[in-house]
Image: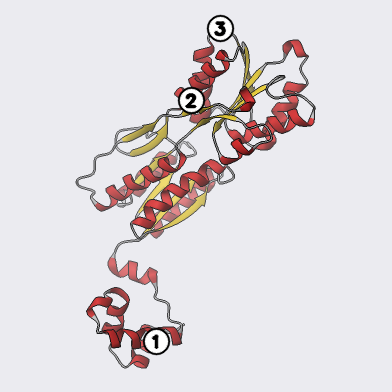
């Protein structure tokens, strides 16, 4: 790789002039700028961003640990993060914990070594997690949780009111005349799953029957397994509607119902959560509880930048967005 000294030698200028062309071009005469840029192009010189950051003592990178990048929900959240980072002239490093506590711990150790400007994370909720996050903060690396709440007032978080989401789902299905409703989701150690179930249960109360179908994960495959379980029940015992903890599960249920010749929503109404793009594009467009995904990511990134840039003036806060219901053909 060519060096900045070689560029300076070829252009017939000092190293300082090359540095000015790269960082403060307005300080260099136009003819000199052209000569330096021609030398850069000829040598294929690329400046060392890591070295620049070390000299400046400040990273230009945000670290992100997503819970499950197989879920399109997190991809949409990351779009919001990337927009805020791009506007601030920063880069984003994205990692997937895949809901694995050990993997998450390794990523946080890497961040402790690399010292990014800050870290955005949807925690796995491992017992040792809080200590690891606190260690980052003690080293001057701010942490903001997204799609999660903070366990105390000494940190920032951005989340969605999932209890409200569950209540919206329950009201919608009750209004459609359903009195036996299934909830498909899991594991219940995940706050979002637990709160979506609890919101549904609170609305249903004594107005109907709630059947819980616990799942090990929220994927299309577990949705198909849910569809198989529901279809195998005698018609008299079968729920007339299912509220799925996310849209991937709902899509899997829909696929299984279609394959078995059961009609949606006549034989089974299906309601998802997140309102990912695939929900509206499904064979039977899915009703879903919509989360402001990009806004969630954008807000979390802005909070992180504020804390990183103005640590003394920054006040920790938790932002809770409200979901809303998008009714489509699957719960007609």
Query: Residue at the location (29% across, 88% down)?
Result: 31
Q: CA distance from mark 3 to mark 1?
A: 76 Å
Q: Are marks 3 and 1 in contact (CB under 8 Å)?
A: no
Across and down, in percent, residue 262 comes to: 76, 24
Query: Residue at the location (57% across, 17% down)?
Result: 173
Specify the farthest residue to the left.
313
> 10 Å neighbourhood of mark 3: few (<14), some, or many (≥20)?
few
Q: Looking at the rendering, which quadrant does residue 204 occupy?
A: top right
Residue 8 appears in view:
yes
Query: Residue at the location (30% across, 62% down)?
Result: 58
> 10 Å neighbourhood of mark 2: few (<14), some, or many (≥20)?
many
Pair 3/1: label in front: 1
For the rendered model, the colour scheme is: secondary structure
Q: Are marks 1 and 2 in contact (CB under 8 Å)?
A: no
User: Of helix, strand and loop, which one carries label 3?
Assistant: loop
304 or 137, which is in the foreground?
A: 304
N-term mark: 3 or 1 = 1
Residue 15 appears in view:
no
**Mark 2 = which residue?**
165
**Mark 1 = which residue?**
38
N-term mark: 3 or 2 = 2
**Mark 3 = which residue?**
207
Q: Residue 254, relative to residue 120: is it above or below?
A: above
Q: Image quadrant for the C terminus? A: top right
Drawn side of residue 318 relative to residue 203, left or right? left
Q: Residue 250, relative to residue 111: is it above or below?
A: above
Q: CA distance from mark 1 to mark 2?
A: 58 Å
Q: Looking at the rendering, which quadrant does residue 9 occupy?
A: bottom left
Q: CA distance from mark 3 to mark 2?
A: 18 Å
Across and down, in percent, residue 189 comes to: 53, 29
Across and down, in percent, residue 26 comes to: 24, 76
């Amino acid at each position: 790789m060519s060096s900045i000294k070689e560029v300076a030698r070829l252009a017939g200028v000092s190293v300082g002039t090359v540095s000015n062309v790269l960082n403060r071009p307005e300080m260099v005469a136009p003819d000199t700028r052209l000569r330096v840029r021609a030398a850069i192009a000829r040598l294929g010189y690329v400046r060392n961003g890591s070295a620049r950051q070390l000299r400046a003592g400040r990273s230009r990178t945000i670290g992100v640990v997503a819970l499950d990048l197989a879920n399109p929900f997190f991809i949409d959240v990351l779009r919001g993060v990337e927009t805020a980072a791009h506007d601030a002239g920063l880069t984003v490093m994205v990692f997937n914990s895949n809901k694995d506590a050990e993997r998450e711990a390794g990523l946080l150790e890497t961040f402790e070594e690399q010292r990014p400007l800050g870290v955005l994370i949807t925690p796995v909720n491992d017992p040792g997690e809080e200590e690891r996050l606190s260690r980052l903060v003690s080293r001057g690396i701010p942490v903001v949780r997204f799609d999660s709440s903070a366990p105390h007032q000494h940190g920032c978080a951005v989340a969605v009111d999932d209890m409200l989401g569950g209540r919206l789902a329950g009201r919608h299905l009750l209004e459609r005349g359903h009195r036996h409703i299934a909830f498909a989701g899991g594991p219940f150690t995940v706050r979002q799953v637990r709160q979506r179930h609890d919101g549904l249960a609170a609305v249903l109360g004594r107005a109907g029957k709630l059947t819980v179908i616990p799942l090990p994960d929220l994927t299309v495959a577990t949705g198909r397994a849910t569809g198989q379980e529901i279809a195998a029940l005698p018609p008299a015992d079968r729920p007339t509607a299912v509220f799925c903890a996310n849209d991937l599960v709902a899509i899997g249920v829909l696929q299984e119902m279609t394959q078995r010749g059961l009609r949606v929503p006549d034989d089974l109404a299906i309601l998802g959560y997140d309102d990912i793009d695939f929900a509206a594009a499904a064979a039977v467009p899915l009703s879903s509880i919509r989360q402001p995904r990009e806004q969630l990511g954008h807000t979390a990134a802005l909070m992180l930048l504020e804390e990183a840039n103005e640590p003394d003036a920054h006040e920790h806060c938790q932002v809770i967005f409200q979901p809303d219901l998008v009714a489509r053909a699957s719960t007609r």
